[in-house]
Image (spheres, rainbow, N blue to C red):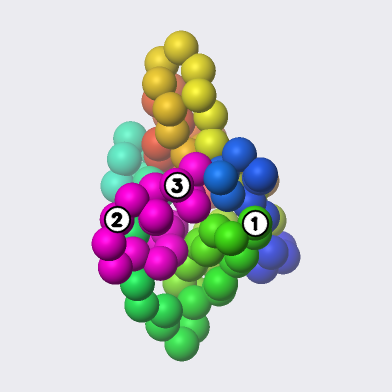
């Protein structure tokens, strides 16, 4: 497993737009939490504080923060932004996930 997580250009553009619209926010924090129908789920929130153990990913003016515990479950992932018939959302393409739910918000390893 590699600890590298990448951001697509589409995701970087959307993150930058969302952060710019929220006073005080400087980054998108992505975390893995227990729950969801497959065992783990992703949590997305805006943040302005970096922790010492955060992985900081920057692309095209966008910043993503991932804590070290979540990184164990996300290593090698790509963060994308999709706009399709069912709506707009961030999508994590995680090579460690062995199964995900139909809605794509939870996964198992």
**Marks 2 and 1: CB-CB under 8 Å?**
no
| Residue holding disc 2 | 22
The numbered mark, 3 or 1, whose residue comes first in the sequence reads 3
Q: Is mark 3 on a helix, strand or loop?
A: helix
Report the residue at 29% width, 55% height from top.
Answer: 22
Task: Give the number of the disc on residue 60.
Answer: 1
What residue did someone put label 3 on?
17
Q: In which quarter of the image is residue 24?
A: bottom left
Disc 3 versus disc 1: distance between alpha carbons? 12 Å
Relative to 25, say whether 37 is above or below.
Answer: above
Crowd around label 2: few <14 · some 14–19 · many ≥20 (10 Å): few
Res 37 label: none
Nearest to the observer: residue 109 or residue 21: 21
43 to the left or right of 95: left
Residue stretch rendered in magenta on the structure: 14-34
Quarter the N terminus occupies: bottom right
Q: Distance between the residues labelled 2 and 1?
A: 18 Å
């Amino acid at each position: 497993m590699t600890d590298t997580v990448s951001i697509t250009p589409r995701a970087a553009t959307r993150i930058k737009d969302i952060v710019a619209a929220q006073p005080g926010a400087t980054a998108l924090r992505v975390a893995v939490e227990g729950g969801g129908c497959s065992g783990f789920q992703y949590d997305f929130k805006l943040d302005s504080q970096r922790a010492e153990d955060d992985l900081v990913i920057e692309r095209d003016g966008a910043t993503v923060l991932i804590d070290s515990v979540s990184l164990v479950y996300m290593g090698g992932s790509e963060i994308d932004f999709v706009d399709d018939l069912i709506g707009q959302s961030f999508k994590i393409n995680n090579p460690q996930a062995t199964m995900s739910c139909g809605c794509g918000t939870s996964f198992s390893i």
